[in-house]
Structures are given as C-alpha cells and as structure tokens.
Amino acid sequence: MGALTPLPTECIGAQTHVSAVRLVVCIIWMLHVATTPYGDFSILPVDSASGYGLGRFLFSHTTVRTVIWSPAVLSALKWSAVILLVGAVTMPRRHGLLIMSCVSVVLLDLLSKAVGAYANHAQFLPLSMMVIFAIGGPRDYLGIGQLIRCVRQAGPGASAHDLDGNWTGFESLLAAMVALPYVYIAINRFVEGGVALFLGDSVCRYIIVGCQSNPNAACLAMLSAFGSSCGLGIRTGFLFATVWECGAVLAVYGGRWAQLWLVGVLTIHAFTWLAMGILFWENMAIAAVVFGLGRTGYRLAPRP
C-alpha cells in the first residue's frame, strides 16, 4: 500500500464536513427565499395572517401586520435575506452575517406559515439547522474554495489532521438532527396506525388519488403494470420504508451502515415523489451531505 497523501492544513475532517453542511443549508434557504413570491402576500387581507407558533405573537398586533403586509416591506425583507445569505456563504467566518440571515429566514418562514396557519415539515430540518448554526457550534468555518480543495484531495488515499473534539461533537449533533425526524415518524406510524395501517388500503388509495390529481408518467405506469397486485406491492414497500427509517438512529454512528442507509432513504424519497408527487428535496440534500461526507461517507479520516 502506497503512502497516504497529506491533505492541506485546513482539511480537518469534521471541520470540513460541518462547513459543507452549513453551506448546503444556506444555499437551500437562498433558493427558498429567492423563489417565494412574498410580495404577493400583500394581496391577501391583513387579517388573514393568523400566525403559527411564534408567529402568533409577532402578528398579534394589527399595527405590526399592517406595516409588514405592504409589497415594499415584503420585498425588502426578501431581498435583504438573500443578500445576507450570499454574504454568509461567501464570508463564512463573519458569523454576524449568519445570525442576521437566520433572523431574516425565521421571520420570512413565519410569514409563510401565517398565511395558511400551518407547519411546513419539509422546511423544518433546514430551519432548525439554520438556528443551530447561528446560536451554537464552532465559528471557524471553511469557505467554498477551501471546501472544494479539500473534497477533491480527500478519499481513501488521504490522511487528514487530528480531529478537533468541538467539531466532531457538532458533527454528531447534525447527524442526530437528520436522523431523529425519520425515527419519530416511523415509530409514530407503528404506534398510531398499528398493523391496520400496513394491511389496509389507505396508502394505496392515497397514491391512486394522488396520481389522478397530479398524474405523471412513472406513477401511471406503475399502476398500470401492477394492476390488482399494486396494493400488495405498495403495502410491502410502505412497511419496508418505515422499518428502514427506524434504522436512521444507527446511521448517526457512521460507518458503512450510514452510507447504505443514505442510499436507501434517498431511494424511498424518489419513490415517494414518483408515487405521490411529494419531493422532500431539502431533506435529501442535507442527508446526502451529512451522511455522504466526513466520518460517515466520503472520508476525511484521522491520522492512524
């Protein structure tokens, strides 16, 4: 076996990994904020902002709602958040930019929820990670150029520098944040739905209705191919997916199982999108970088 190729000085395994997760979370919010038409909220009556969670306190005063509910203020909030997020990405060691970005993102997220008074669980993970990055964890994050350099030179033949306990602890926290929602949802299905959920036709009916209301070629082809046996195939797949989601708790510990679990859960998300038209791309992106880089996947290993 040849000698290991030393990585650049800044390529500490966990530091590179956590910096990459932070970068992905910021990019997710840049895309969300830039593509959401917040200005259109002003078309709705001011009283329609009922609020959800913290939004109940924010929008409890009519004066506050009236000021925020103007096109100019909504547009200013939107593009200010985008600029702050760009700054947080390009200048990762200016932590104040990340804090201001987090405040802007939380405010805009509350505005979105206030319109329909709902909790968007598709954005819960990136939102909670944004808050965690803003209030805790190390501060010496790597920039985009450094990350690209580290990932290009990493892999099976690379030797990283000794890992810092502050970084590895935060790395484990991020992995747990990704895993716990999957475990909770899976266990909740077993507890609340019981055996009847997996033996009944509710999931099949949900998929059929979803295909009829939002048809796509893959969904219709699946129903046509399976025919009467579609129910059994869907039930089996649903049970397998639920059991697989429970395995997320083991993925937190890293190793080969984390990589295998990642492939499985991304496949589950893909089938969910094809069958139901629901794509949790935010969770997929974060899971891919959390379990596909660092100690759990594309490895930046400590010196033996």
Image (cartoon, grey):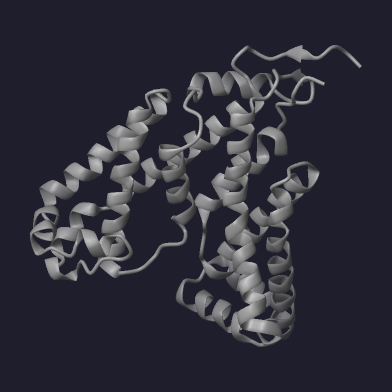
**Residue at point 70%, 20% (across, down):** 162
Please state, as top left, top right, bottom left or bottom right, where the N terminus lies in the image: top right
Q: Where is residue 146 in the image (x, y as percent from the top left)?
A: 54, 19
Q: In which quarter of the image is residue 102?
A: top left
In the picture, measured across the screen, residue 67 lies left or right of residue 199, that is left
In the picture, measured across the screen, residue 124 lies left or right of residue 157, that is left
Considering depth in this image, is 167 or 235 the residue closer to the camera? 167
Q: Is residue 276 above or below residue 151?
A: below
Q: Quadrant of residue 171?
A: top right
**Residue at point 7%, 59% (across, down):** 63
Q: Where is residue 226 in the image (x, y as percent from the top left)?
A: 71, 77
Please state, as top left, top right, bottom left or bottom right, where the C terminus lies in the image: top right
Q: Is residue 240 above or below residue 195?
A: above
Q: Is residue 42 above or below residue 226?
A: above
The answer to whether any part of residue 77 appears in the image is yes
Q: Position of residue 214 (x, y in %)?
A: 47, 71
